[in-house]
């Protein structure tokens, strides 16, 4: 089984873990540093794993190229004559500015489609074979010291820290905070710097500002974690509710045809009753006639009854017009010499009869 060493920096830990699991599923013996703890024992273990590997994979990213530990790892692998396979995981890497030891190697692009990337990776691993280790072995690189470790030594020493040293500490920690890295360690160094008797006033003010920045970042991290946890709980509850609905069987009742006919008859009767109520409401508000469905179910007088008030006014007007006509007729008859009393009585009876007839007809 071919042994693979994976070199990466802290920011690429998830990519290294995913790659190691993928290689293990393809029957490769992949090794990578799980802890990134530091110290001489840790560094000796890494160098031993580099010597034992058949292929040295270097995860190419902007951060790994700037990492001192990564530089010493691939530099030692090159000195041992190991086959180095760069794997590009960051599109922001400028391939034209790679170190010569990496620029001369054929790299695999992990930013492309996963199937294409996997095929290229397996093909490259199967063709690469490292030669026998040189004898004698090249000198081992020294264990990389974290830049925060150096700052810790500076703020812990008893010697005087001048303004240049204090500015260097603040600048280094500010860069670490901007990358949101080593926040806890930066907080400890800043607190120790403020406690020193030689800490300048301007240094103390800026250190307090950086401490406030660290505190705000920690609060944001906690809020983000709580939000993610709350969303996860909501998703779990939603899944449970969905499963409950899917597992719940609806109560189905089989209805006989006779019962269906009775239900349809009752429904039609309810519709007829609702229509009658609407017609009565329309009549009560003196509205115009509404086109109704199933008009044959009702009496014509109930649907199209005319208002009594307008009929009375129309009859009275006709009566007044008839009286005027009677008076005019009387004057004409009197002018031509007819007896006054007979003509007036006959005309009055005619007018009265016609008026009564019209009033009874309308009512």
Image (spheres, helix red, strand yellow):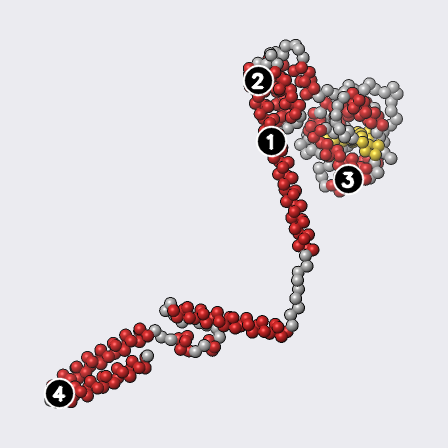
Q: How many labels does the image show?
A: 4
Looking at marks 3 and 2 on the same chain, the residue that comes earlier in the sequence is marked by 3
Q: Which residue is drawn at 60% across and 12% down?
A: 197
Q: Earlier in the sequence, mark 1 or mark 3?
A: 3
**Mark 1 falls on what kind of element?**
helix
Res 233 visible? yes
Q: Is residue 103 visible?
A: no
Residues at marks 1 and 3, CA–CA distance in whole angstroms = 40 Å
Q: Residues within 10 Å of mark 3 (few under 14, many from 20)?
A: some
138 left or right of 12?
right
Is label 1 or label 3 in front? 1
Q: State how far apart marks 1 and 2 are (Cα).
A: 23 Å
Sequence order check: which comes first, mark 1 or mark 2?
A: 2
Give the residue displayed 78% in from the left and 38% down from the top: 22
Which of labels 3 and 4 is toward the front? 4
Q: How crowded is mark 2: few (under 14 residues within 10 Å), some or many (20 or more)?
A: some
Q: Based on the displayed image, in which of its 4 quarters is residue 175 positioned?
A: top right
Residue at the spot of label 2 = 204
Q: Which label belongs to residue 118?
A: 3
């Amino acid at each position: 089984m071919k042994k693979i060493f994976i070199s990466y920096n802290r920011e690429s830990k998830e990519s290294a873990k995913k790659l190691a699991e993928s290689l293990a599923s393809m029957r490769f013996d992949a090794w990578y540093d799980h802890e990134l703890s530091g110290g001489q024992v840790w560094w000796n273990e890494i160098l031993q794993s580099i010597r034992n590997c058949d292929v040295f994979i270097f995860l190419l990213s902007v951060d790994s190229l700037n990492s001192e530990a990564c530089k010493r790892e691939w530099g030692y692998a090159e000195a041992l004559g190991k086959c180095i396979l760069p794997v590009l995981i960051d599109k922001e890497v400028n391939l034209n500015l790679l170190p010569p030891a990496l620029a001369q190697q054929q790299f695999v692009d992990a930013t492309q489609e996963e199937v294409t990337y996997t095929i290229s990776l397996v093909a490259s691993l199967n063709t690469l074979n490292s030669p026998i280790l040189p004898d004698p072995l090249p000198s081992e690189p020294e264990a990389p010291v974290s830049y925060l470790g150096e700052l810790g030594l500076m703020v812990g020493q008893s010697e005087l820290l001048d303004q240049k040293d204090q500015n260097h500490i603040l600048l280094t920690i500010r860069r670490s905070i901007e990358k949101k890295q080593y926040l806890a360690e930066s907080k400890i160094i800043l607190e120790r710097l403020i406690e020193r008797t030689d800490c300048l006033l301007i240094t103390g003010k800026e250190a307090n500002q950086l401490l406030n920045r660290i505190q705000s970042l920690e609060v944001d991290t906690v809020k983000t974690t709580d939000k993610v946890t709350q969303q996860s709980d909501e998703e779990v509850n939603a899944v449970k509710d969905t499963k409950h609905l899917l597992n719940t069987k609806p109560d189905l009742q089989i209805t006989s045809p006779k019962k269906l006919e009775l239900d349809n008859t009752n429904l039609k009767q309810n519709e007829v009753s609702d229509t009658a109520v609407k017609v009565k409401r329309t009549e009560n508000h003196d509205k115009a006639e509404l086109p109704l469905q199933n008009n044959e179910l009702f009496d014509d007088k109930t649907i199209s009854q005319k208002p009594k008030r307008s009929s009375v006014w129309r009859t009275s007007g006709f009566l007044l017009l008839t009286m005027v006509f009677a008076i005019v007729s009387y004057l004409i008859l009197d002018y031509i010499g007819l007896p006054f009393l007979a003509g007036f009585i006959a005309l009055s009876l005619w007018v009265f009869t016609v008026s009564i007839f019209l009033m009874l007809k309308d009512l």
